[in-house]
Amino acid sequence: MAPAPIPAAQALTVTELTLAIQGTLQGAFGEVWVRGELSGVRRVSSGHVYLSLQDQGATLPAVIWRSTAARLRFDLVDGTDVVCRGGVDVYPPHGRYQLIVHEIHPLGVGALQLAFERMRKKLEAEGLFAPERKRPIPFLPRRIVLVAARVQGEGAAEDVARGLALADERAGADVIVVGRGGGSPEDLWAFNEEPVARAIAACATPVVSAVGHEIDVTIADLVADLRAATPSQAGELVVPVRAELIDDLVRRESRLVHLVRTRVDRAWQRVEASAGRPCLRDPRTRTDPLRRHLDHVGARLASRHPAAELARRRSTVEDLGARARLAVERRLERAREGVASLRGRLSPAVPRGVLDRGRARLLDAASRAAVGARRRLDRALSVHEARRAALEALSPLRVLDRGYSLTRVGPRILKSVAQARPGHSISTQLADGVVESRVEAVRPATRPAPTLSAPRSP
């Protein structure tokens, strides 16, 4: 019996069959979450990353497009357990299915922690955390600049970096304070970004980092010249408390008075010890023995030498005695004058006057610095409140208050009737709650969608 003829006209081409399989897979699975171990990670010159997800029973090829790979905050390393979100697709040239990864997270260690460690190791290797780079914060700075910028969300790191550069170049500051209040690791993440770290390192002005709470440590804290545990502590570190300054001045005054009195007492002890010496009380106690010795020598010479020679030698001896006596008297007079001068210079009244004037200058500088810091803080708080009000006005919940709603099919927001099928359970979020319902029918629009406008009052 002859075989039946093959209906070539009805046969599918390879491309047609592959595209049909592709459409079936995409329609059946949509986006899925897949857990597995990374294997064969390979980043190509175009920026795309090719890899496989595997477990004990199977291997799934996957690809991360360049735009997604550029946002990754951890390194893709073979052997890392991850969970991925993506869509199942077919690659026609090879006829194999693969996962197009839209989101990927490591299991066990958070992505933010991995990104933090990677940045910390990189900057530490460059020496940006080295203690010898740290500069001292000026005592009682005359001008303190607070960096005002977006501190959270997309582009916040670049805003903070620009604010640091502007403060360093144009503000004429003695010290720069950069930071924000507490928040989640995601809220504080801008201060772990490389642009902020580089901007702090590039500042010629000393920088104080005050980010979050005491337990929060960021890359900015490690690079800055001084880390404050909180923004409030930053104010105390930059501008000392007035009471502490006064206490320090009192301690210094007491110590200085003690040192001056000690020097005066020692000087008087030396003077009294010198005054007790016989040669200073009466210089003749030194010259009389010499004179008697000379007389004895003269008598002996008189019996051996002519009278003229004896007279000459006697005159020489008397002249030497007179000069010695005069030298001793002059030395005693200089000692007395030195003691009087030392007593005047070491008078306790002199350092007390200097301390009083220094204390007055310090108190005046502390008062002016406190007033200036409070004015700048008030201005920064006003700017912050205005931006908070603007963000509140743009909140999606305010849009719902005006009569709009959000409809979801499962976790996905419903953007087109093509995403809904009769029988699907849907949830509609309104301003005051959620309505659960079921799709009875789907009617595509027969005319262009109207322009979005605010609902009218009935």
Image: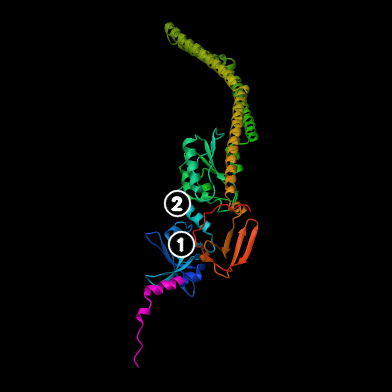
Q: Is residue 186 above or below residue 239?
A: below
Q: Give the magenta range.
A: 1-23
Q: Which residue is mark 1?
A: 76
How many angstroms separate mark 1 from mark 2 (CA)?
A: 21 Å
Name the spot of residue 294 as percent of width and height, x first: 50, 13
Q: Which residue is mark 2?
A: 125
- Is 14 one of the magenta-colored residues? yes
SS at mark 1 in the image? loop
Q: Is residue 371 above or below residue 57?
A: above
Which image quadrant for residue 230?
A: top right
Residue 447 visible in rendering: yes
Q: Residue visible at 49% across and 42% down? A: 164
- Is 245 one of the magenta-colored residues? no
Tell me if 327 is positioned left or right of 229 in this view: left
SS at mark 2 in the image? helix
Q: Amino acid at mark 2?
A: Ala
Crowd band around label 2 with a 10 angstrom C-alpha radius: few (<14), some (14–19), many (20+):
few
Name the spot of residue 308 as percent of width and height, x first: 42, 6
Crowd band around label 1 with a 10 angstrom C-alpha radius: few (<14), some (14–19), many (20+):
many
Name the spot of residue 354 as percent of width and height, x first: 59, 24
Name the spot of residue 185 as percent of width and height, x first: 56, 53
Q: Amino acid at mark 1?
A: Leu
Q: Nearer the viewer, residue 108 or 399?
A: 399
